[in-house]
């Protein structure tokens, strides 16, 4: 059973400046709700019971968002507003589920995952990158289903335009079924000539806890960061099974300013 989800939240959000100069990108509202809450709802719906947030000193406001009890208590005492009471109840529920770890220097997704090692209890866990929203169909739920069938690790994937391959982790495979395939190899942000396919990694992963030892062995890769893609590559080369899940939902890129603006409009138009 997959019960724990880790969510890297320590990134600087430079692609979203100036909005992120004072506000973490994960708290920016999309159609009236912080980006991060969409991610948490997807997890709750997929049966996740515990969240591990990787934050940094600079992003403590994420902790405050979920642990601002005195503020809520005072307001509720004064106003007895039904909507605020409901919001507070929701936040109290999340409080019981969230643990925090710190990554004060942005050293990459691999480094972020490694920091969660002490909290991971089972053989497999879920990781979600909050820049990537997937609406209409619950992607995490689909992936957990595929994990149950294959007993392997799972990565969300989507066909992207060939000219954009250098923006993504790219997967290679031999045989493709309708909604999934076994992954033969992965490469982080290849140039167009070297890309083995145009199936991109989207930010949902079911990972084996064997990944921690693999990350420890890694040297910094692209941009001097420790990439989770490189640890996945080593595991695949050691015959660990990874599957690409071609998800049904609609992908919204919230990691760039233009993507973020479009996502708000699409959700508002009722694409959900
Ligand atoms: C990260 C991963 C990349 C993946 C992408 C999905 O890149 O490293 O493999 O394709 O997320 O959004 P980033 O968006 O952090 O540059």
Image (spheres, helix red, strand yellow):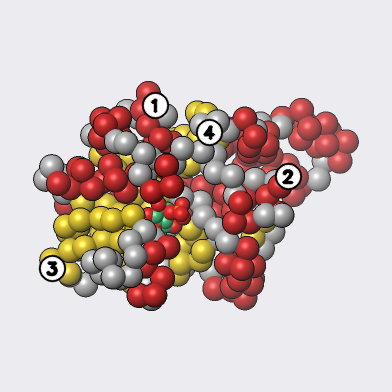
Of the image marks 3 and 1, the number of the one nearer the N terminus: 1
Q: Mark 4 points at which residue?
A: 105
Between marks 3 and 1, how big is the CA–CA gap?
Answer: 36 Å
Label 1 Cα neighbours within 10 Å, binned few <14 / some 14-19 / many ≥20: some
Q: Which of marks 3 and 1 is in front?
A: 3
- Residue 115 seen in the figure: yes
Q: In this view, does 219 lie to the left or right of 182?
A: right
Q: Name the residue under label 1.
A: 119
Task: Identify which residue, 119 or 81, lies in the foreground.
Answer: 119
Between marks 3 and 4, how big is the CA–CA gap?
Answer: 40 Å
Q: Residue 22 carries which label?
A: 2
Task: Identify which residue, 107 or 174, lies in the foreground.
Answer: 107
Q: Name the residue under label 3.
A: 175
Q: Which residue is drawn at 50% across and 28% down?
A: 101
Between marks 2 and 3, how big is the CA–CA gap?
Answer: 47 Å
Helix, strand or loop under label 4: loop
């Amino acid at each position: 059973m997959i019960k724990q989800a880790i969510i890297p939240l320590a990134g600087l959000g430079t692609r979203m400046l100036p909005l992120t100069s004072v506000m973490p990108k994960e708290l920016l509202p999309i159609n009236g709700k912080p980006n991060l809450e969409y991610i948490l709802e997807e997890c709750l719906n997929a049966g996740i019971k515990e969240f591990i947030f990787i934050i940094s000193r600079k992003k403590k406001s994420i902790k405050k968002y979920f642990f601002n009890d005195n503020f809520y208590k005072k307001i509720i005492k004064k106003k007895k507003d039904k909507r605020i009471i409901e919001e507070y109840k929701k936040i109290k529920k999340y409080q019981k589920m969230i643990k925090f770890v710190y990554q004060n220097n942005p050293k990459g997704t691999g480094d972020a995952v490694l920091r969660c090692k002490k909290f991971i209890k089972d053989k497999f866990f879920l990781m979600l990158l909050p820049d990537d929203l997937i609406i209409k169909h619950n992607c995490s739920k689909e992936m957990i289903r595929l994990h149950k069938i294959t007993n392997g690790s799972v990565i969300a994937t989507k066909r992207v335009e060939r000219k954009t391959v250098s923006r993504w982790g790219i997967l290679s495979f031999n045989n493709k079924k309708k909604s999934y395939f076994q992954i033969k190899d992965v490469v982080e942000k290849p140039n167009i000539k070297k890309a083995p396919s145009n199936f991109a990694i989207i930010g949902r992963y079911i990972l084996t806890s064997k990944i921690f030892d693999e990350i420890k062995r890694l040297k910094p890769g692209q941009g001097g960061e420790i990439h989770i893609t490189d640890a996945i590559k080593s595991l695949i080369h050691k015959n660990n099974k990874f599957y690409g899940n071609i998800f049904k939902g609609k992908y919204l890129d919230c990691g760039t300013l233009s993507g973020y603006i479009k996502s708000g409009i699409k959700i508002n138009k009722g694409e959900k």
